[in-house]
Image (spheres, helix red, strand yellow):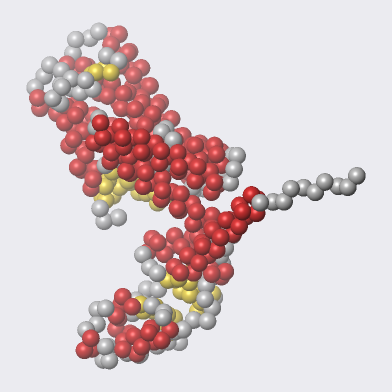
């Protein structure tokens, strides 16, 4: 995570600060401190602009308010993560970034009851923070104390009330990656297959994104950015679920190639090129009394043409080979390839080379699953009418 800085760990989860957060933080400090105009909601000032004090004090209050607000966003994400941990989902990290917080989870629960609870936990936390903050505002106003510090605290609590209630409401929009989109999918999944539920929820999410984009054209450019983010995220969620569902029940053993062509580390890069041309394979395990590495076409690009005959595979191969067991879940193996940005995985069983699986193998399985689903739908559509028994 090169673009993020680790700032701590909560519930055993690493917390990161994305560099985009550093871009948005000054903007929030300005909005909270001394914007050009005064804005109020329900008699709650949304900045310290009207506070009777020096400008630097207003900015000090604004800085505290911005940090506290992002702390409440972290609480929102921790609520998701806490329930996810309860359901056995591994949380890799939580990252605070320009659009808020993001919890990186290994796999979402498929049970609709678990998914909607986990999704709703974040907005519920924001709503509770907002209502408690508003309650404290009302309580402090009843005291009628004349104090600049108390006025500042009231404005701070008011900001937390308004923005957390807005955060809760915004996140309940039924569109991926908003929490409302996951609650909607959980509802659909209780009535249909998980894949169909995802497709339906993603379609609704895209409609909301289009509507938000149109609204942004006439009112605020920021909504256009959010609309693009939502539209892309809804599409990616649908694609990811389609892939996962297509590989459901399959293992690496079902997809891998067992007869694996291997190369020796003493082979020259020119010989490797010739072998690639002859076999149309772009990568090979390197074996010398066992697996010692893997070499791909991209590895050969660092060798000058005039040294192809002189350079050996041993000089360019990758020694830290990522391997999987034949019994590994196919969807997990594909996710591993995506995370490591590699095009193939070596399959080992009991320390022995058992095969190789490539991106093409996964794509073939996904295409076959799509064909089967299409045929199944066609069969349901064109079933012959039931025969009437003879009288």
Residue appearing at x 35%, y 77% in the figure: 296
Left or right: 121 as drawn, with respect to 42: right
Picture coordinates of residue 309, whole percent (x, y): 27, 91
The foreground one among 207 and 238 is 207
Q: Is residue 10 visible?
A: no
Residue appearing at x 30%, y 15% in the figure: 42
The foreground one among 75 and 227 is 227
Residue appearing at x 53%, y 65% in the figure: 365
Q: Residue furthest right?
A: 391
Please, is residue 268 above or below residue 66 in the view? below
Please, is residue 148 above or below residue 211 in the view? above
Left or right: 57 as drawn, with respect to 368: left
Please, is residue 7 above or below residue 308 in the view? above
The foreground one among 314 and 267 is 267
Label count reads: 0
Q: Residue furthest front?
A: 391
In which quadrant is the N terminus drawn? Answer: bottom left
Residue appearing at x 27%, y 24% in the figure: 159
């Amino acid at each position: 995570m090169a673009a993020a800085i680790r700032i701590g760990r909560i519930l055993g989860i690493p917390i990161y600060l994305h560099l985009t957060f550093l871009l948005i933080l000054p903007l929030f400090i300005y909005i909270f401190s001394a914007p050009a105009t005064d804005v109020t909601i329900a008699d709650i000032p949304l900045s310290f602009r009207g506070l009777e004090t020096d400008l630097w004090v207003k900015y000090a209050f604004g800085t505290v308010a911005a940090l506290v607000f992002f702390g409440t966003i972290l609480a929102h994400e921790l609520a998701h993560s806490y329930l996810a941990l309860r359901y056995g989902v591994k949380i890799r990290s939580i990252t605070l970034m320009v659009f808020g917080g993001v919890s990186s989870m290994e796999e979402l629960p498929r049970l609709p009851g678990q998914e909607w609870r986990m999704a709703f936990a974040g907005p519920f936390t924001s709503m509770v923070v907002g209502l408690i903050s508003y309650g404290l505002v009302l309580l402090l106003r009843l005291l009628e104390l004349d104090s600049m510090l108390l006025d500042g605290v009231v404005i701070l609590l008011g900001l937390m009330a308004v923005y957390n209630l807005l955060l809760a409401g915004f996140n309940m929009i039924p569109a991926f990656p908003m929490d409302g989109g996951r609650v909607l999918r959980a509802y659909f999944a209780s009535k249909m297959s998980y894949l169909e539920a995802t497709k339906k929820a993603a379609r609704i999410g895209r409609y909301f994104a289009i509507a938000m984009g149109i609204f942004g054209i006439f009112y605020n450019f920021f909504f256009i950015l959010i609309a693009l983010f939502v539209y892309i995220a809804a599409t990616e969620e649908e694609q990811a679920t389609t892939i996962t569902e297509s590989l459901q029940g399959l293992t690496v053993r079902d997809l891998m190639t067992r007869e694996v062509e291997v190369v020796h580390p003493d082979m020259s890069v020119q010989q490797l090129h010739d072998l690639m041309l002859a076999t149309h394979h772009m990568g090979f395990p390197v074996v010398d009394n066992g697996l010692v590495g893997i070499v791909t076409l991209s590895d050969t690009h660092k060798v000058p043409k005039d040294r192809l005959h002189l350079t050996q595979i041993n000089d360019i191969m990758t020694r830290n080979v990522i391997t999987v067991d034949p019994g590994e879940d196919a969807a997990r193996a594909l996710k591993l390839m995506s995370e490591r940005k590699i095009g193939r995985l070596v399959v080992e069983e009991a320390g022995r080379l058992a095969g190789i699986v490539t991106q093409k193998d996964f794509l073939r399985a996904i295409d076959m699953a799509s064909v089967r689903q299409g045929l199944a739908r066609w069969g349901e559509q064109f079933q012959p009418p039931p025969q009437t028994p003879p009288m």
